[in-house]
Image: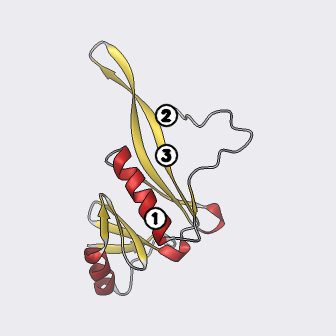
């Protein structure tokens, strides 16, 4: 596995230490929380971010229009959004479901005490619902 930093998109210098932390971390497929880093896997690459660099995280549920038989349905897709310095959105990670998203958000709240947890809707936005 290659460990790549989310902040500057470069490959990590100390791959073995990150591999050890990744293996021992708490799993929330496809994400993991280690002692010092937040990880998520995409293909053969594992992206990481120091927990101290997480400034905000929240769940995003998007309704994807899909056709089932003769009907059209809006299926919810659960994602976790991780923001870094200057409120820059660093990652949007697809989760297996609502239960896994809530569990990861709770774990991030414990691991990142300085991070803002949850979504604060701007005053100009009328609804929290977003259709893709």
Q: CA distance from mark 1 to mark 2?
A: 26 Å
Q: CA distance from mark 3 to mark 2?
A: 12 Å
Identify the residue at horizontal 43%, vertical 48% (top origin): 79
Identify the residue at horizontal 40%, vertical 51% (top origin): 101
* As drawn, 95 above or below 88: above
The residue labelled by disc 1 is 108
Task: Using the rendered view, name the quadrant where residue 36 is placed.
Answer: bottom left
The residue labelled by disc 2 is 132
1 or 2: mark nearer the eye: 1
Tell me where residue 19 appears, x and y as whole percent: 28, 79
Q: CA distance from mark 1 to mark 3?
A: 15 Å
Query: Is residue 83 or residue 104 the one in the foreground?
Result: 104
Count residues near mark 1 (Cα–Cα under 10 Å), then give few for <14, some for 14-19, many for 20+: many
Tell me where residue 57 appears, x and y as whole percent: 53, 58
Task: Using the rendered view, name the quadrant where residue 74 is placed.
Answer: top left
Q: Residue furthest top?
A: 70
Q: Secondary structure at mark 1?
A: helix
The residue labelled by disc 3 is 60
* As drawn, 39 above or below 30: below
Say whether residue 35 is left or right of residue 120. Answer: left
């Amino acid at each position: 596995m290659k460990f790549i930093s989310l902040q500057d998109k470069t490959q990590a210098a100390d791959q073995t230490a990150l591999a050890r932390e990744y293996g021992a971390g708490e799993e929330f497929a496809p994400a993991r929380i280690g002692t010092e880093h937040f990880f998520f896997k995409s293909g053969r690459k594992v992206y990481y971010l120091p927990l101290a660099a997480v400034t905000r995280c929240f769940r995003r549920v998007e309704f994807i229009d899909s056709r089932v038989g003769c009907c059209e349905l809006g299926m919810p897709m659960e994602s976790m959004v991780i923001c870094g310095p200057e409120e820059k959105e660093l990652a949007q990670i697809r989760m297996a479901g609502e239960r896994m998203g809530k569990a990861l958000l709770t774990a991030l709240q414990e691991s990142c005490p300085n991070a803002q947890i949850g979504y604060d809707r701007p005053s100009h936005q009328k609804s929290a619902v977003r259709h893709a």
